Image (cartoon, rainbow, N blue to C red):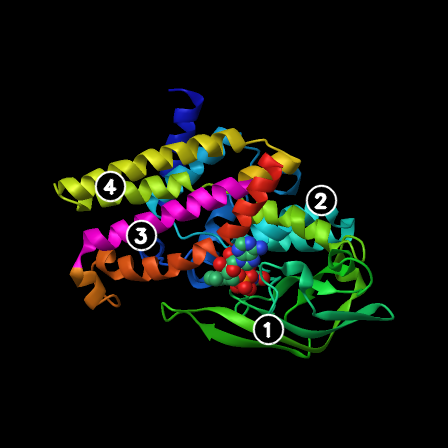
Amino acid sequence: MTDLAAFRAEVRQFLADNLDEELARAGRRQTSVFSEPEHSMPWQAKLHARGWAAIDWPVEYGGPGWSAMQKYIFSAECARAGTPSLMPQGLKMVAPVLMHYGTQEQKDFFLPRILNGEHYWCQGFSEPGSGSDLASLKLRADRDGDHYVLNGSKIWTTHAHHANWMFALVRTSSEGKPQAGISFLLIDMATPGLKVDPIISLAGEHELNQVFFDNVRVPVANRLGEENDGWSVAKYLLTFERGGRYAPTLFAQLGKLREEADDDPVLQDRLRREAVTVEALEAIEMKSIGAKGAEAALYASVLKVQGTEAEQRIAVLACDIAGAEAWCVPDGQSNDRLATAVPRYLNGRAATIYAGSNEIQRDLIARVSLG
Ligand SMILES: Cc1cc2nc3c(=O)[nH]c(=O)nc-3n(C[C@H](O)[C@H](O)[C@H](O)COP(=O)(O)OP(=O)(O)OC[C@H]3O[C@@H](n4cnc5c(N)ncnc54)[C@H](O)[C@@H]3O)c2cc1C
């Protein structure tokens, strides 16, 4: 057996031993890009016990030290087995930024708590009126001694109602270009004056929130990076939010749909066409491994556009394969396929909007690659 085949066998064995029926069912029933914490956190704890919770982290912070190919195999096996997804805000978004910009104290305090699941993070970037045009954000952070005093609001904050920490962009100056007056803060959600209100989605689910700040005091020591340099920190973070591995999950979905589509030649043809696109996506993902700086940002945008649009087409296919039944009783079904097709389709509409809409990504791609 080659080393990689042995590695794959080891991952499969781990999944067979640890993905119990409750977690596997939660994975099969996951209709949004995010798992609920009641499933993602126990799964993270099992991975953490094995040293596999943060596969992209350097060994010195608790990563497993895998090669790019091992990480890919691990993702593919998790997708095939249908594990619940891990919350990316801590492990994949704020963690690499802490490693790059954080002080030693910040790294020592936050990184172990992200890894062991004690801290659950949410992302406070968007505001009412500041989404695509993020640099126009207004949430004020006025300096008062060794604290900032925050007033304003954040919106579309995924899982803010579960989170105990938020990373946020705030306005610390109104001088010069809007980008030049933004700072990046780490905010304890239990701070007095902070209030979380729910927003219910098209699919009838509570994932999103609006968060209000009324004289919320945040220690200056919780700033990541320099004052008024938060835009650079955010740009660094966004390459981690947008990049990723779409192909393993999409291949796993297509595999299941192929079994369900019977011998219908039209559906089988559509499935084959999608398989070709996902193969192309996988090739880009492979090429993107190890890219840095502007090239990494370009790959992240290309993968975001291609990955989310393939995801949406496959969600439509899943509905067509499930047929009329799925539209009549989308909830509480005993059959996973019927229970998830429509909610996944509805949730999936958001994929081309969040993490920077696909129109904005196309604009970025054009600017970088075509000048
Ligand atoms: C499910 C979901 C979860 C989210 N979670 C979070 C979160 O956890 N934290 C957070 O901070 N934010 C979150 N967001 C917010 C998300 O980042 C914004 O919705 C996104 O950036 C778009 O901003 P907007 O909604 O204000 O739309 P707008 O910026 O108002 O855009 C409206 C439309 O106009 C288009 N458009 C705008 N400007 C341009 C342009 N220059 N060229 C071409 N087209 C343009 C857009 O593509 C879009 O189609 C989430 C959003 C969704 C849907």
Look at mark 4 in the image and give the residue it sits on. Answer: 270
Q: Write down the region rendered in magenta.
A: 300-323
In the image, residue 247 above or below residue 158: above
Q: Circle 4 — which element? A: helix
Residue 37 horizontal/vertical position (percent)? 47, 62
- Residue lying at 36% horizontally and 55% vertically, measured from the top left: 23
- Residue lying at 40% horizontally and 47% vertically, measured from the top left: 309
Q: Which mark is residue 137?
A: none
Q: Amino acid at mark 4?
A: Arg
Q: Circle 2 — which element? A: helix
Look at mark 1 in the image and give the residue it sits on. Answer: 211
Q: Which mark is residue 100?
A: 2
Residue 233 horizontal/vertical position (percent)? 70, 50
Tell which tag, 4 or 2, sits nearer the viewer: 4
Q: How far apart, in angstroms, are the residues tagged by discs 1 and 2?
A: 27 Å
Asked whether residue 19 is in view, the answer is: no
